[in-house]
Image (tube, coloured by chain):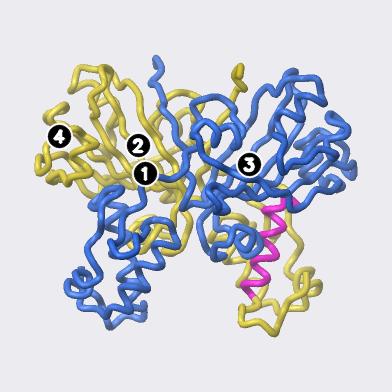
Chain colours: A yellow, B blue
Amino acid sequence: MIINREVSKPVYLQVADYLRNNIYSEEWGKGEQIPSENQIMKSLEVSRGTVKKAVNMLVEEGLLYQIQGKGTYVTEDNISYSLGKGLLSFAESLEGQKLAYETKVITSEFRKATKEIASRLKIAVGEEYLYMKRIRFVEGEKVMLIENRINSRLCPGVEEHDFNKESLFKVMEEISGKRIGYSESRYAARVVGEKRGKELEVSPDSPVLHLEQLVYLEGGLPVEFGNVWLKANKYYLGTVLQREEM
Amino acid sequence: MIINREVSKPVYLQVADYLRNNIYSEEWGKGEQIPSENQIMKSLEVSRGTVKKAVNMLVEEGLLYQIQGKGTYVTEDNISYSLGKGLLSFAESLEGQKLAYETKVITSEFRKATKEIASRLKIAVGEEYLYMKRIRFVEGEKVMLIENRINSRLCPGVEEHDFNKESLFKVMEEISGKRIGYSESRYAARVVGEKRGKELEVSPDSPVLHLEQLVYLEGGLPVEFGNVWLKANKYYLGTVLQREEM
């Protein structure tokens, strides 16, 4: 690759593109060490400051990580959320991977349903539901922002539980007297934006994996409508798909 | 929300954040019309040009779309790739949704396996495999970039097929004489970058849903290692997850 000094695109962005493409094209495998600063400076004829800036950008994006005094490596081990094990809460999934986590409730308050929320939770427009916002830390780092909207008619008293410690799925099952049945889930890639970026401590233009999930009790009543924002440099969705008879 | 004119953050980005947050918080539901340019100008005390710039940014991100002479709406219908139907090719998934698509082969060539590719396809480092890059159009728009790495030892002559028209899964099954068995798939949110952004005709900092997939034949031999880059404003992953006995 040759750096183009004629175009208006800053040189460090061109170096970042070069690094990103080597990862995306699987030229550099997961866990592999990438060339040293000196090697990149030499081969692209750029300054150390430029290489550092480009590498930092990809560390922020989660594609690279650095080990002090050793070098820079392609990110290998993100946190998996497996889709192949039926409906698991994220807490259950983390427990399955033996990952230590903590949850912190930021907001818990009753709100009046907008048209959209009402139609999802099958309640009346203006009817109250419990809105809860939580941050989850894995090994001390903020990795997901969870927004829950709970149909409190099906779970009266749900607001009195301490969701810093208790599992939402378990509490909803206990109060409603019904098992969780299934969920309709959709995942998309999004830009995190200012507000949620601040909460996850990433820059506003960072990518996040967005889950929108409607959870039903057995029998088919919608009990919880949630949005989860997963840090892209930490989380991936993993699944094994069997080929079915066509 | 009040626009802060003291901070260095451009006003249109603040307006874009305001719009994005109304969508992310489900304040404005899918398919709903958002307030008019005039209403936004008035309520935030900003110029028409600023509103237009913010709206355009969110149209690019895929969160909003505009109907000439009618207004601006929250994006509703993306293309779904269902994870609940076992391993389907994207072509089969689009056929299931009765969506018209076209595929265009951009590159098809033999390459020598790097360490990473060799370990995935269980071939020797330096051994040749077929690399293929394709763009898929849905209703005339580029929606995904597909990179396939095919274990041509298991599928001799695969390079002679016309993958503008033929299905890769079918051809691999025919040549190898074995059925496709299963895949290991991982999905993550990524920044598209310069190179792949150009190919999908989106700006380099756009979010994409990235699928990395290793496909196995019945019996367990890895036959194809692929990367698929799905435009975030078009594609989501959909699934219904059943709660299993704990």
Element type where label 4 sits in the image: loop
Q: Can you see residue B16?
A: yes
Query: Which range of residues does the magenta coloring cover?
Result: A12-27
Q: Are marks 2 and 4 on the same chain?
A: yes
Q: Are marks 2 and 1 on the same chain?
A: yes
Disc 2 chain ID: A
Q: Amino acid at mark 4?
A: Ile
Q: Can you see residue A233?
A: no
Residues at marks 4 and 3 touching, judged by CB atoms closer than 8 Å? no
Q: Which residue is mark 1?
A: A228
Which image quarter: residue B11?
bottom left
Task: Name the residue located 37 percent from the left edge and 44 percent from the top edge.
Answer: A228
Task: Point out the frontmost of discs 1 and 3.
Answer: 3
Q: State the residue in front, A132 or B2.
A: B2
Disc 1 chain ID: A
Residues at marks 1 and 3 touching, judged by CB atoms closer than 8 Å? no
Q: Which residue is mark 3?
A: B212
Q: CA distance from mark 4 to mark 1?
A: 22 Å
Q: Which residue is mark 4?
A: A123
Q: CA distance from mark 1 to mark 3?
A: 22 Å
Disc 3 chain ID: B
Quadrant of image for the N terminus of chain B: bottom left
Q: Earlier in the sequence, mark 2 or mark 4?
A: 4
Task: Name the residue located 41 percent from the left edge and 27 percent from the top edge.
Answer: B240
Task: Point out the frontmost of discs 2 and 4.
Answer: 4
**Residue A171 location in percent, x, y?**
24, 27
Element type where label 2 sits in the image: strand
Q: CA distance from mark 2 to mark 1?
A: 8 Å
Which image quarter: residue B246?
top left
